[in-house]
Each structure stands twice: as C-alpha cells, then as structure tokens.
C-alpha cells in the first residue's frame, strides 16, 4: 500500500487517483489478502477433520 501511495503522490495530476479511488484500491487489497488466508485455513482444517491419522502425526511432532 505504501508503494501505491508513493507512486500516486509522484504521478502527474491527470494520472493521480482520488482519495476515494485510493481507499477503494486499499479495501480490495485487504479483502483479497483476508479472503485467501481464510480459505487456506478453512481448507486445512477441513482436511485435518477428514484425516484424523494426519492430525495424530501432527500432534506428535516436537
């Protein structure tokens, strides 16, 4: 996000994004990161529930 802000600040007036557009872009980035993390954790937990033998092997790790 800081790279986007710096790039926007150094852009010409015609190419610069408005504050509302910047906020929208930041919301997309945050949501995209949250969604992928949530999906990965959810899928991992689902697979562990389906495979209790793997759960036991993971619990046995030091």
Image (tube, grey):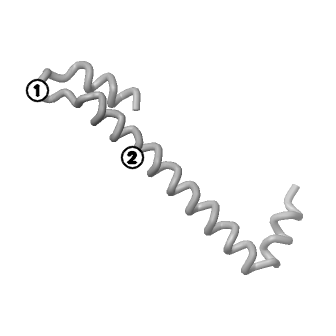
Element under disc 2? helix
Q: State whether residue 3 is above or below residue 47.
A: above
- Work out whether 34 lies above or below 9: below
Relative side of 44 to 18, left or right: right
Q: Quadrant of the N terminus?
A: top left
Q: Which residue is mark 1?
A: 14
**Image-quadrant location for residue 39:** bottom right
Q: Dividing the image into 4 quarters, which one contains the C terminus?
A: bottom right
Element type where label 1 sits in the image: loop
Please tell me in which quadrant of the rendered image residue 47 appears: bottom right
- Which residue is pictured at 28% across the width and 36% down the height? 21
Residue 31 vs residue 16: left or right? right
Name the residue at the top extreme: 10
Residue under the image location 82 percent in, 78 percent down: 53
Q: Quadrant of residue 14?
A: top left
Q: Indicate the position of residue 35 as horizontal and vertical percent values.
A: 51, 56
Q: Report the residue that reaches farthest toward the left.
A: 14
Residue topped by disc 2? 28
Q: Measuring from the top left, give residue 33's x and y in whole percent.
A: 49, 49
Q: Indicate the position of residue 45 as horizontal and vertical percent values.
A: 70, 67
Q: CA distance from mark 1 to mark 2?
A: 23 Å
């Amino acid at each position: 996000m800081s790279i986007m802000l710096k790039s926007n600040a150094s852009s010409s007036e015609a190419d610069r994004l408005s504050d509302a557009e910047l906020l929208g872009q930041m919301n997309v980035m945050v949501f995209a990161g949250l969604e992928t993390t949530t999906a990965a954790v959810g899928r991992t937990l689902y697979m562990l529930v389906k495979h209790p033998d793997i759960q036991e092997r993971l619990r046995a790790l030091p």
